Every structure is written in C-alpha cells, then in structure tokens.
Amino acid sequence: MEFNKIEDILEKYFQGETSIAEEKQLKEYFSSPNVAQHLEQYKPMFGYFSQVKEQKSTQEIPLKTKKRNVAWLSIAASAVVLLGVGTYFYVSEKNTTPVVAQSELGTYDDPEEALAATQKALALLSSNVNVGIESVHYIKEYEQSKNKIFKQ
C-alpha cells in the first residue's frame, strides 16, 4: 500500500502539484534503504537533490553597477547650449542690414524717376489684388453650388 502512495506522490511531483510535506516524504523514502525495485531509478535524483542542498557556494559574485559620470554629461550639455546661442547671435548679426538714415528712404530727386517707381509699385499691387479677386469668384461659385445642393 505504501508503494502505491509513493507512486501517486511521485506522479504528482512530476506534474508539479505536490506540497512541501509530500516532497519531504519522497526525499525520506528515497533516502531509506528499502526502495521498491521499479522505483530505484529515481533514487539517484533525490539523492542528488539532498547532496546539492547541503553544498554552500563560496564564490563571490561581483556586482557591477553602471555609474554614469553626470559631471561630463552636464558639461557637454552646457557646451551644446553655448554653441547654439553663439551661432544664433553670429547668424542674426550677419543677416541684419546696416541702418540707413530715415531721410534717404523713399525719396527721389527726379520727379520722373519717382513717378516710374510709383507706377511699378502700383502695377505690382494691382496684379496681386486681381489674383485675389479671381479666387473670390471661385468662392461665390462654390457658395451657389452648395446652396443648390443644401437648400435652406
């Protein structure tokens, strides 16, 4: 009867369903001299578990922690910021045009030259306004089509 009980516990052990008390029973059974003939094959396995449990490891495991050097990281970030600010001021100073006296802007000594410049500026303005007016016609057509489809 005891052999049947050990076989049941052994089957549960291999399924991973045993309790600690049942595992202790298996270890005691397989460490005793009276093991059934057909269960002899499991004796070395449980003997090994008992033997390994007794061993203590004296080997020291080195734990390497990664320490990032924050000082170098902050110095690099500061250098990048300073480089960016310096580049901005260098480029913005290069792109500024020299200040011309207010009296020189938009004044002409020759009236014919002033008339030609004014006509050129007004023609440019007129062509841009005409383009804007043409796009308004498309919007009116869209509104009419929309009103036909969605009668209010």
Image (cartoon, rainbow, N blue to C red):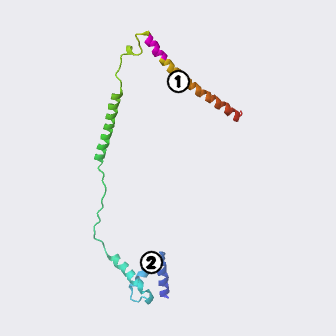
First in sequence: mark 1 vs mark 2:
2
* Residue 99 horizontal/vertical position (percent): 35, 20
Quadrant for the C terminus, please: top right
Q: Mark 2 highlights which residue?
A: 21
* Residue 73 horizontal/vertical position (percent): 30, 46
Task: Give residue 62's quadrant in the image.
Answer: bottom left
Foreground of the two, 91 or 12: 91
Helix, strand or loop: magenta stretch: helix
Residue drawn at (56%, 26%) of the image = 132
**Three-letter code, disc 2:** Ala
* Residue 35 horizontal/vertical position (percent): 42, 88
Instruction: List the single residue furthest toward the right.
Output: 151
- In the rendered image, residue 88 lying in the magenta stretch gets the answer no
The label number, if any, that marks residue 128 in the structure image: 1
Residue at mark 1 to residue at mark 2: CA–CA distance = 95 Å
Task: Give residue 97's quadrant in the image.
Answer: top left
Residue drawn at (38%, 84%) of the image = 31
Task: Give residue 50's quadrant in the image.
Answer: bottom left
Decide if residue 2 is on the left or right side of residue 93.
Answer: right
Which secondary structure lies at badge 2? helix
Foreground of the two, 125 or 18: 125
* Residue 120 horizontal/vertical position (percent): 48, 18
Residue drawn at (50%, 82%) of the image = 8
**Three-letter code, disc 1:** Asn
Residue drawn at (44%, 86%) of the image = 39
- In the rendered image, residue 113 lying in the magenta stretch gets the answer yes
Foreground of the two, 47 or 120: 120
The label number, if any, that marks residue 26 in the structure image: none
> Which segment is the magenta one?
112-119
